Image: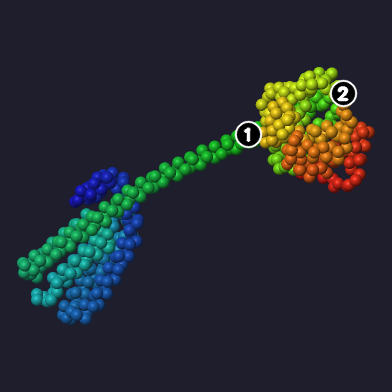
């Protein structure tokens, strides 16, 4: 036995000679496994052996003399064939694993003893050598019928001994011929024993691995079932959490909307307070908001920026709350000192809106601080110019001037919308961004509709509106597409 075979036997816990498992219960399981897997193949092999044995007797009728034929046929059909049939029927006994080894050994022994008996019945000098037939029987029984190792060993030894006795005592075979024949039979028997040993060992190995796989499969199935239960439970918990989260998100969304609505209302009220101090109506901040949004959409600003602009622009003059009435409401021209005070409303507005850092109030703070900056740098309070002025502040600057021109103030009457537009065009490149002026002219029909819808309804404003709209009829559009 090689070291590999020894290691394999040790791993499988096999007896080194009989190949039986050390654990008797496992040995019982193996026998059940072995014969349940190979019984059908074994029965087919036996039937083929019976068929070949029977057909070969018909051939012998043509070759053997009639004086010898009767004894040969008796051996073949009355002794060997019934024994082979009996070995086949033994495989159908209820407790198969306890009889199948004997059944295979009986079939092999019957064939071999029948061949040797025929050899014994023939006269001396008759040309017949049983050794090739015995070699064929050995190989067929060991390799094809898968005889177990211990039964194969005992059967082969018995056949060789029986042949030696018949060859020596009955046929008086020469010692030299007997030695050569015995050598071949012993070698073939050893080869057959090795084949049986290897096949059985591999069968036992397959059984162990199969048993391990089944055990692991059972464990895996149990683990999978447990995982399924845990996954199901986790899924249910996650579903509950998801529903709870959705409810919370919905509640947060509602509360956020409420807070935003409250914030927007407060912004509107704060803007109104500043406008009322300047003797303006609340319509000014509405017009401003819609002018700004319409212009912002025309230049391609996204929805969120337009929404911020709508509310933030309402607080552009919130700093006027900090300007004294005698300056803010003065009907005449302001002195240099008064104008310096008036210009501080941008910084005051930015200061009022600096206590919070939400996106809306940050935008409103920048607009309040920078909506009087000019494109050429001549504005206040920082004197910045061109692209350094934030886009939203530039939009508010233009829209605020337009609405101021078309509104009554303590120090002036309202201009017509056409006059105001011409003034905006004149100041393009100095006060206003030229690009915004072009876009403002493109949306001027929308501007006129906003001006009419949110008019202060003073006689002067009605008159200016009629003057602006009589010469040409503009198609009415919405302020901003949804």
Name the residue: 65% across, 35% down. Answer: 246
In this rendering, position of residue 217 left or right of residue 386: left
The x and y percentages for residue 77 are 24, 72
The CA distance from mark 1 to mark 2 is 62 Å
| Quadrant in which residue 345 is drawn | top right
The x and y percentages for residue 74 are 21, 73
- Pointer 2 residue: 332
Which image quarter is the C terminus in? top right
- Pointer 1 residue: 245
Of the image marks 1 and 2, the number of the one nearer the N terminus: 1
Name the residue: 30% across, 50% down. Answer: 205
Give the foreground label among 1 and 2.
2
Dot 1: element: helix
| Quadrant in which residue 481 is drawn | top right
Name the residue: 8% across, 68% down. Answer: 177
Name the residue: 29% across, 51% down. Answer: 204
Query: Foreground: 180 or 33?
Result: 180
The x and y percentages for residue 401 are 80, 33
The x and y percentages for residue 56 are 24, 74
Q: How many marks?
A: 2
Q: Is residue 426 visible to us here?
A: yes
Dot 2: element: loop
């Amino acid at each position: 036995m090689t070291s590999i075979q020894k290691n394999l036997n040790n791993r499988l816990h096999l007896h080194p000679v009989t190949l039986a498992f050390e654990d008797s219960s496992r040995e019982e399981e193996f026998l059940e496994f072995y014969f349940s897997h190979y019984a059908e193949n074994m029965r087919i092999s036996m039937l083929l052996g019976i068929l070949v044995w029977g057909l070969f007797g018909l051939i012998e009728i043509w070759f053997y003399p009639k004086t010898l034929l009767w004894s040969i046929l008796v051996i073949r059909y009355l002794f060997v064939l019934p024994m082979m049939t009996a070995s086949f029927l033994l495989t159908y006994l209820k407790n198969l694993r306890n009889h199948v080894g004997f059944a295979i050994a009986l079939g092999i022994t019957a064939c071999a003893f029948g061949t040797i008996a025929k050899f014994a019945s023939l006269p001396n000098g008759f040309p017949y050598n049983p050794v090739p037939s015995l070699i064929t029987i050995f190989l067929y029984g060991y390799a094809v019928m898968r005889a177990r190792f211990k039964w194969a060993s005992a059967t082969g030894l018995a056949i060789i001994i029986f042949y030696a006795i018949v060859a020596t005592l009955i046929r008086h075979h020469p010692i030299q011929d007997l030695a050569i024949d015995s050598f071949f039979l012993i070698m073939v028997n050893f080869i057959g024993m090795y084949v049986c040993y290897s096949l059985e060992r591999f069968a036992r190995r397959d059984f162990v691995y199969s048993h391990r796989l089944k055990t692991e499969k059972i464990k895996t199935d149990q683990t999978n079932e447990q995982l399924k239960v845990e996954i199901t439970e986790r899924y249910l918990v996650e579903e509950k959490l998801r529903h709870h989260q959705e409810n919370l998100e919905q509640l947060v969304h509602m509360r956020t909307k409420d807070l935003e609505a409250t914030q927007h209302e407060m912004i509107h009220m704060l803007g109104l307070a500043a406008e009322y101090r300047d003797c303006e109506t609340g319509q000014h901040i509405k017009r401003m908001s819609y002018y700004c949004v319409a212009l912002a959409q025309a230049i391609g600003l996204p929805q969120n920026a337009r929404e911020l602009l709508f509310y933030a622009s309402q607080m552009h003059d919130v700093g006027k709350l900090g300007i004294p009435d005698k300056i803010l409401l003065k009907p005449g021209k302001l002195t240099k000192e008064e104008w310096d005070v008036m210009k501080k409303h941008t910084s005051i507005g930015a200061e009022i809106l600096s206590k919070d850092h939400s996106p809306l109030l940050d935008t409103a703070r920048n607009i309040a601080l920078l909506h009087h900056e000019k494109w050429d740098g001549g504005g206040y309070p920082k004197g910045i110019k061109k692209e350094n002025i934030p886009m939203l502040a530039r939009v508010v600057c233009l829209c605020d001037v337009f609405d101021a021109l078309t509104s009554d103030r303590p120090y002036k009457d309202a201009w017509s919308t056409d006059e105001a537009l011409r003034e905006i065009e004149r100041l393009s490149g100095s006060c206003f961004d030229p690009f915004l002026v072009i876009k403002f002219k493109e949306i001027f029909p929308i501007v006129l509709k906003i001006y009419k819808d949110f008019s202060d309804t003073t006689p002067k404003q009605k008159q200016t509106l009629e003057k602006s709209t009589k010469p040409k009829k503009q198609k009415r559009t919405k302020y901003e597409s949804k």
